[in-house]
Amino acid sequence: MKIRSLLTLIIVLVIGSFSIVLAQPGFGPGSMPGPGMMGPGMMESVDSEYDFLVKMIPHHEEAVYNAKILRDNTNREEMREFARDIIKVQTQEIEEMKKYLAEWYPDRTNNYQYQPMMGDYKNLSGEELDYAFLEDMIFHHMGAVMMSQQLIVQDLAEHRSVYLLAQSIRDSQRQEIFMMRDWLDKWYN
């Protein structure tokens, strides 16, 4: 119990610290550590609503792609259900964000090059897959939480629907981080 409480406190502090840093004036692209310093890919920062949408779409697409591999190769029903939830929710959010881009930013050119944050799970299954997925998805979710929090705190949303989407992503993925940490503690103590 003490370990779980300590891990929860650490996650809250890390997310809170990144959120504070991300909200600082002058914090922008290129000011975060690069690949290998915080995880497999790079944590992103956003400087506008458009930037948030353009960066969150491939971020979600990576999660959906890997959740499909998890769904098809895990032995745990909890993980299969979690994968289904990721696929359903984030696919809906991707469609919503693409609709916003088409409606509000039809003339903007998207040259964004997404840097993957998760590993390659094609040859993994069972326990090995579950562990790797949980470890990577915690970090991946933290990226989405931080981008969402930055949009909210810096008041970057030009449309209420994007603000509400960012709130939903932040809150649901923060809860999922706690759930994943609990599973890691329970299954791989």
Image (spheres, rainbow, N blue to C red):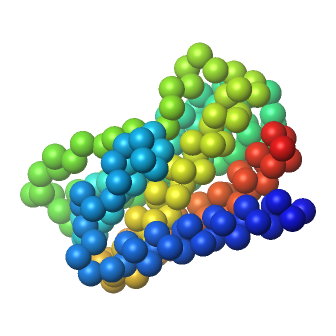
Image quarter of the N terminus: bottom right
The residue under the point 66% across, 42% down is 134
In the rendered structure, the answer to whether residue 98 lies left or right of residue 147 reads: left
In the rendered structure, the answer to whether residue 51 lies left or right of residue 119 reads: left
The residue under the point 79% across, 54% down is 182
> In this view, which residue lies farthest toward the top?
123
Task: Specify whether residue 52 is in view.
Answer: no
In the rendered structure, the answer to whether residue 119 lies left or right of residue 172 reads: left
| Image: 23 above or below 1 | below
Of residues 171 and 185, the one nearer the viewer is 185
Q: Position of residue 133 (x, y in %)?
A: 62, 37
The residue under the point 64% across, 34% down is 132
Q: Position of residue 129 (x, y in %)?
A: 67, 28
Image quarter of the C terminus: top right
Count of numbered tags: 0
| Image: 125 above or below 138 | above
- Quarter residue 160 falls in: bottom left
> In this view, which residue lies farthest toward the front?
37
Of residues 131 and 2, the one nearer the viewer is 2
| Image: 98 above or below 73 | below
Task: Specify whether residue 113 is in view.
Answer: yes
Of residues 90 and 28, the one nearer the viewer is 28
- Quarter residue 80 falls in: top right
| Image: 43 above or below 122 | below
Q: Position of residue 102 (x, y in %)?
A: 23, 57
The residue under the point 76% across, 66% down is 6
Q: Position of residue 12 (x, y in %)?
A: 63, 71
